[in-house]
Image (cartoon, rainbow, N blue to C red):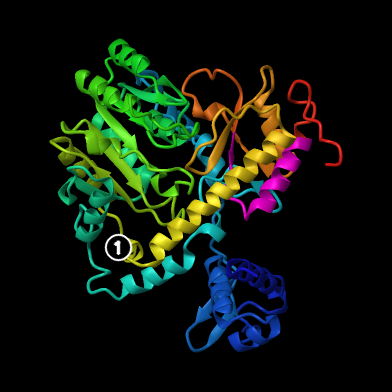
Amino acid sequence: MHERSSVADLAEAIKRELDRYSPGGKLPSSRALVERYRVSPVTVTRALAQLAAEGLVVTRPGAGAFRARPRTDVEAPGDTSWQEVALSADGATELVPRSVDASGVLVTLAAPPPGVIEFNSGYLHAALQPERAMAAALARAGRRPGAWGRPPTDGVPELREWFARGIGGAITAAEVLIAAGGQSALTTALRALAPPGAPVLVESPTYPGMLAIARAAGLRPVPVPVDSDGVRPELLAAAFEATGARVFVCQPLFQNPTGAVLCAERRPEVLRIARAAGAFVVEDDFVRRLVHDDAGPLPRPLATDDRDGVVVHVCSLTKATSPSFRVCALAARGPVLERLRAIQVVESFFVPRPLQEAAVELVGSPAWPRHLRTVSGELRSRRDTMAAALRLGLPELALPHIPAGGYHLWLRLPDGADENAVVSAALRAGVAIAPGRPYFSAEPTAGHVRLSFAGVAGPAEITEGVRRLRGACSGLLGGGAQAPRGA
């Protein structure tokens, strides 16, 4: 059994038996719990720590664990209805409301109920994460001299240098800031580049988290359509001219959600158009390290072809490691770097040094390239399994593009199909999928769903998930998704 499951199971077992002990009563020793439940001492320690965090158990070094005494000082909840007035009082005067709709982000972050297959995850399954390598890196980092001290506000020099080399071109370590994940870096970039009320050009469709960042900052997302070769330059130029925008946010490599790669012919056009408009391009290079092993050579980041400081580059380690390994680079050239630095310092001071030092240890270890090779092959295999299962079991769902990188497929529903009904039916059948509507900043061209193949245990779970989805979609996709004979 996986260690995390063992901890949860043991904690639940101890919780069920707490009524056998009076408040303040001593629980069995750690050794007794090890023998009784046939688990490791580490599992016992973690389970007791979990119960202590819930306020059910008190641990005393050298004495053992005791049932916690019930709290007697809990006050009745107050009246918070006044907040409705306070939070909405300024809404009428705001040019663009800054209310935050996090639903599109929470779809990929919320853990589904037990037994539900996660086709909506935005991260690698635990089986694909380099847990041992990260644990070893964190242990080594903790022993580094000064590892728990205050880091430089821009980031640990070795880590900035590593990111600069990975970006390439003329980018130097002095032009790199370390941020706490891509979401934080994008938030800093948009705050630095556009005042509240300003338009910001975005790809359509695009990542819901970026739309949420823009709206929370009081910005107006303006969609620019993408096709299989990335953003369309003629529409980008027209959008700059029509809106006077000074920022364009894009994902040139394996765009989320379409999986498109900005083609070689359009790359210089995008930079030229932005430069002519006096605008910045925020390049979210979020899955470069999740390339599939059949992809071939990758195009370089846009930042490597930028001589004039047009591109603000964001690249993270999170997608290739773990949701909790929130280490990211924010790179820029020219005066904008100082503004980015100032906003980041004000918002977060710095990324915790132990995490930065662990990142240095991880990417410098032999385990890192091995991990990337393993993930590259696994993602390609899972992608092919999902695509084949969908073509066989759900041919009504259009799959116009199979990406050679990233972790998901973007599917178009038949005309007239109810996207919300499909998503709801899928969840009732035990499979969680992401609806397409949150990926559009304006009216969508059609109904879509996004299916991730990275957040599941393996190919067998993908096949089972598509089987469940096929049953759920029966009667919802026009002519219906009928199971093939013998299925």
Residue 350 left/right relative to 417 = left
Image location (x, y in percent) of residue 471: 79, 37
**Nearest to the observer: residue 62 or residue 250:** 250
At x 34% / y 73%, what residue is drawn? 140
* Secondary element at image label 1: helix
**Nearest to the observer: residue 237 or residue 487:** 487
Q: Which residue is mark 1?
A: 360
Q: Quadrant of the C terminus?
A: top right
Residue 303 left/right relative to 266 = left
Q: Amino acid at mark 1?
A: Val
Above or below for 276 versus 394:
above
**Nearest to the observer: residue 253 or residue 192:** 253
At x 56% / y 45%, what residue is drawn? 121
Q: Is residue 469 magenta?
A: yes
Above or below for 20 versus 260:
below
* Residue 347 visible to the viewer: no
Q: Residues within 10 Å of mark 1 (few under 14, many from 20)?
A: many
Residue 320 left/right relative to 41 = left
Q: Which residues are magenta?
A: 450-471
Q: Is residue 375 magenta?
A: no
Above or below for 359 versus 445:
below
Q: How many numbered discs, if any?
A: 1
Image location (x, y in percent) of residue 247: 28, 26
Image location (x, y in percent) of residue 180: 34, 51
Rendered image quadrant of residue 209: top left
Above or below for 43 versus 72:
below
* Residue 7 visible to the viewer: yes
At x 75% / y 36%, what residue is drawn? 470
